[in-house]
Image (tube, rainbow, N blue to C red):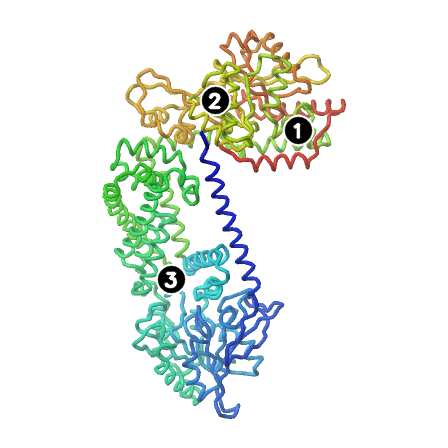
Amino acid sequence: MTDPSPPRRHWRRWVLLVYILLVGVSHLVRARRRVEPTPREGETVQLVQPVRGDAVVDGVVQLAFRDDHPPLPDSARPVVVLAHGSPGDNGAFWRLAPALGERFRVIAPDLPGFGASSHRIPDYSFRAHARYLLELLDSLGIERAHLVGFSMGGGVVLNMYDLAPERVSSVVLLSAIGVQELELMGDYQLNHAVHGLQLAGLWLLREATPHMGLLDDGGLSYEYARNFFDSDQRPLRHILERFRPPMLIIHGDKDPLVPPPAAVEHHRIVPQSELRMLDGNHFMTFLQPDRIAPLLTDWVERVEAGQALTRTQAPPDRVARAEVPFDPRSVPPAEGFSLAVLMVLIAGATLVSEDLTAIGTGLMVARGTIPFWWGTAACFFGITLGDMMLFFAGRWIGRPALRLAPFRWFVSEGEVERSSAWFRKRGGAFVLASRFTPGTRTATYFASGMLHTSFWWFAFYFIVAGVLWTPLLVGLSAAFGAQMADRLVYFEEHALAFLLVMALVVLVVLKLGVPMLTHRGRRLLRARWWRMRRWECWPPVVFYPPVVAYVLGLGLRHRSLTLFTAANPAMPLGGFVGESKSTILAALDRGAPGTVAATLAVDPRDPPDRRVAAVRAFMEERGLTLPVVVKPDVGERGRGVCIVREPAALEKALRSIEELTLVQEYVGGHEYGVFYYRRPEEPHGRVCSITDKRPLAVTGDGHRSLERLILDDPRAVLSARQLFRRLASRLVEIPAAGEEVVLVEIGTHARGARFVNGWALRSEALERAVDHLAQGYSGFHFGRFDLRVPDEAALRDGRDLRVIELNGVTSEATHIYDPDTPLREAYRTLFAQWRLAFEIGAANRARGAPVASLGELMVALFHRVRRPSRG
């Protein structure tokens, strides 16, 4: 029988290698092409200094521009500067500039990042672009100019005025952006997040695809995304409110990119401005220049003749309206193209978080940004698309997809197993219920596809659930958001904070409120509280810092941070990390034959068929039958340990190993952890800790499912989430009355086994037997034996001991994990244990035993962290 897995992995590796090679070639091609762009016909180049924010930095930036001169003396021709939008270049004015050039000197630059100007600059914001244009005017000896800002160029010319108001004769906002409140979602932070996602996507497309430079010069380029991401529209309102020269606003009444209400608001807050609302869209500038050119010509001539108003000449009623604070409720709802953009963004956001997107949409509904049914439809469409993708991924790819990104980020095989079991039992009701139970949807929809559920049947239940859930969540968020918005005077300034608070409230409701509605949720919440209160359940990062601090103190006292590595000269690093179980067990077996469980080390470098054959031969030679124990040769806390009871499962495990793995005889009976130490100068050692490792089990009653039994058991519920993953396919089983179901056979506390202080079982006979075992392994002084014995009497008598593991200096006196052990006593025991390890290490060092260097220890720890961790 051949193994199909390696060829698949081999094929995938080749695909990955080819992809990496093509991306590398693409980067080389792009690097060779990465030179300053070539100016087009009619363009001139001026070298200016790079700008970052408001500061000029070292370097050189190429600035290309067109300079159209009318046939008039220099002193008689007004200067008009045309600033294009993003994405784009001065080509936006190629038909407009010549018409203006008959009367004025027209400067039409390619803003840095676009066209024939330098593309690699430190700052792409329109604030930086304003400084570049001022540098250009300086280099050309131009003192004052009329500024025309098209689209994003509106931000550029307004910032030019803010930086140098004395150099601005007038400003024309041509289909131009301005106040933040009327841009996209109306809030800087939200818009900035959208632009950040856009930037990340375009950067990834440019850098991670082998396009050979074809995407470097496109319209929706990285430079365009940086322009939006680097720019901040919030100051533009204040600039407009302080603006004093004449201003002309030209806008299309059907503009899909900058809403016409933005032009109306600009006209209101600049009381001297003139507004020309035309029948047209955002692209009138280059599609209908014959309509725009006369307006600009007439405007510049009137300004030059002193016939256009300045702020001091503005009518009093206009000034009064300009001084009225902006009312966020006056923002009209998105429509047309803007509405379409928002709906696409909402639908896309549901792929990240369905519920939070629905909440955010409700807030936009409350604010009047988007109509309720349009927002709900966008949420429903995105939710449907994403969850149908999960269904078809389960249908077409199945379980292998769970090992691939992005599916493995959101759902595990255990979750799918559990959902599959419930799905087989409850079908459509489970699909319907999962929509109202956050945390179960991904696994449920994937499992539905994997089980080849009828698409139309699944879609019916799915759509019914979505139709009920989506309007409910959006509507609740909109209603609550509307009430809160009425009480927030500065809602616009605090929109992001409000959204975050709302999201936090909803998350609390989802994480606490919703679980409280079910027995399962209540028990899991209670288990989480119990785990927080019981120190034995604390994660290592919480429990061990005092121990680490104490060990460092011991190291300073003994003038060697690694002295403990000499406690067991027979083990690498004293058994601190990376010790080989097979090597230790082989040495023990030589010293005390027949006391060690039969063990075979399986090398992952051997072909799969050879591994299987070697294990079969080993079991036949030793007279072993299933079950057997399979575990990594290097590991701790039960990592990767499993008891294999079926031939197919054993073969599958052997074919999938990726590190040196042990196949060990399964020894029945009771398991105990016995901690032993012997000072080098003493003839005999001592037992200082005994732990009774009791398997975790529940007893059936003929009514409750295995899941319910786990939830109702005060000990099992503490490890419920782990058990649910491991026993996913069995959770719906109903054990018979009186039937004991062993949940954890392996004597590992991290897996859920109960540890009980077994000091009462200590006897001289046991101590002599353990001392005999230890002294048969020359160079061992300190560590814990994991033993299997038929019963308590055998342990007390020191007979029929079978060693399944021996751990070195980092093993613990595990009786401390008895639930009745106070935290203070646990730390006292561990401190005494480490103190003893340093003392034994010092004695062995005096006898010539080597002490590992700190560098050796760090390298070993690094390799341990890199080792795959499979549980």
Q: CA distance from mark 2 to mark 3?
A: 58 Å
Q: CA distance from mark 3 to mark 1?
A: 61 Å
Query: Which mark sits nearer the N-terminus, 3 or 1?
Result: 3
Q: Amino acid at mark 2?
A: Ile
The residue that disc 3 covers is 186
Query: Which secondary structure, mark 3?
Result: loop
Toward which corner of the image does residue 154 lie, by quadrant? bottom left
**Residue 20 position within the rendered picture, expressed as x and y whole percent measured from the top left:** 52, 51
Looking at the image, residue 664 lies above or below residue 488: above
Q: CA distance from mark 1 to mark 2?
A: 27 Å
Q: Residue furthest front?
A: 1
Q: Amino acid at mark 1?
A: Leu
Looking at the image, residue 341 lies above or below residue 812: below
The label number, if any, that marks residue 746 in the structure image: 2
In the image: residue 431, left or right of residue 30: left
**Residue 761 position within the rendered picture, expressed as x and y whole percent measured from the top left:** 54, 11
Q: Amino acid at mark 3?
A: Gly
Whether residue 635 can be seen here: no
Query: Which secondary structure, mark 2?
Result: loop
Toward which corner of the image does residue 605 lie, by quadrant? top right
Q: Nearer the viewer, mark 3 or mark 1?
A: 1
